[in-house]
Amino acid sequence: MPSPLDDYAARTPGSRTWYERARAVLPAGVSYGIRDLAPYPFYVDRAEGARVWDVDGNEYTDYWCGHGALILGHAAPPVVEAACRQAARGSHFGFAHPLEVELAEMVRRLVPGVEMVRYTNSGTEANMYALALARAFTGRTRVAKMEGGWHGGLESLNTAVHAPFGMPEALGLNPHATADTEALPFNDLDAAQRALARGDLAALFVEPMMGAAGCIAADRDYLEGLRELCTRHGTLLVFDEVITGFRVAPGGAQQYYGVTPDITTLGKILGGGFPIGALCGRREVFERLDHRRFGGRGDRAFQGGTFSGNPVSLAAGLATIRLLEGGEVYEKLDRLAARLREGIAAAFAEHGVAVGVTGLASAIGIHFRSGAPRNAAEASADDLVVARRYFDHMLGCGIVFLQPASPHLFLSAAHTEADIDRFLEVTREFAPQAGRSA
């Protein structure tokens, strides 16, 4: 019997050709390492709704949804229309424009902890400027983050992302950049209390739901405890809501949990499928970016960029969030996600396969281990062999998500009950063989 990968190679000769060309001009043939699927990635020709089609004409149901950015699905007509209208009026001004104000007003209205907003081009940039702002406001340099937390390529926070956490994450990182960074276990309030009690942390960065570690949600009392401790010790609480912003609720995870940070970083859904990032939060903190009030270089923090506040991204973001703010999209997504989580768990449990299904709202993580992990250290014990075999099986049946060894799923408004039926059907086909050796 041919393996899923044998069938994949037979169906994707065009992608193989593109991959061979790509290797000559792109390291590993890709623009981002996590897109490098074995034995080679399929190359997307077009996308619409919950579907992508590769250059060979193969159709896939997409549960990656542009790294989670496409909550309305691919090429949602209202978003496409808004972006095209704006592009015809000008794709980049380099001057102030009304869309900057309109989207910031909408973010302030929906997200509880937001009084002021500044735009960036990515979540990485948003976290970079958020860290600088926190240091400027507090006069401190040390910062804490979570083991397994991913805040983009920013050097100061690019540590302790993958287990074992004591090793460098990559070559080329300046060790001095992380000398003032402390990594703490997620969902461990005692560890946070010990670190914060020293009184030298400018900021504590936390994802209310850890993304790279496999969609692991924070305990409510953990976030409440972080809020109380940060206030007590003069540390700014930073929620990285690049993933959870506008996915968990119109007001993000801080609305869902009822916990308000000092600074929030946003991205993904905020741009409606176009590049964007933002940092936002308390007025008192953000006034440190006001060059009119703090004119000297030693008095203020800096933030800016050529494409910050790009009008096409903002137009697409406005169109997206206007469709989300009523809440109807979330009702559908949460229903489908709950059904998917329960179905996945049941399919594997029926055959005695250990699995923990995690996530919040329409974000889902699948962990082949006994019980759902509560932090990245526990998630590092996942059975990666079974996860990769599951990925190959699903891909061979036209269902795609990332990453192969750590399945992350994002639903969109374009997914249907029939899509969930098919996902669970294919999962049930794989479950009996999940425990067998490859």
Image: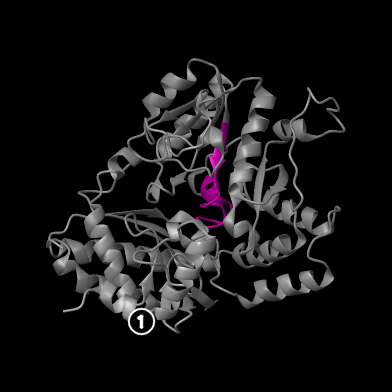
Say left or right for 327 vs 271: left
Q: Is residue 421 visible?
A: no
Q: Quadrant of residue 117?
A: top right
Can residue 81 be seen?
A: yes
Magenta segment includes 72:
no
Task: Please give the residue where the numbered disc 1 appears in the rendered image.
Answer: 11
Q: Residue at x 45, y 21 (%)?
A: 195
Q: Nearer the viewer, residue 134 or 20?
A: 20
Point out the stretch of residues depicted in magenta: 237-255
Amino acid type for the residue under numbered disc 1: Arg
Please name the colour scheme applied to the rendered image. one colour
- The percent coordinates of residue 210 (x first, y second) are 43, 45
Eyeballing the image, is 192 above or below 50?
A: above
Helix, strand or loop for disc 1: helix
Verify whether residue 253 appears in magenta: yes
Image quarter hosting the C terminus: bottom left
Q: Categorize mark 1 by other alpha carbons within 10 Å: few (<14), some (14-19), many (20+).
A: some
Quadrant for the N terminus in the image: bottom left
**Left or right of 13 on screen, residue 366:** left
Q: In x, y percent, where is residue 320?
A: 64, 66
Q: Residue at x 28, y 78 (%)?
A: 7
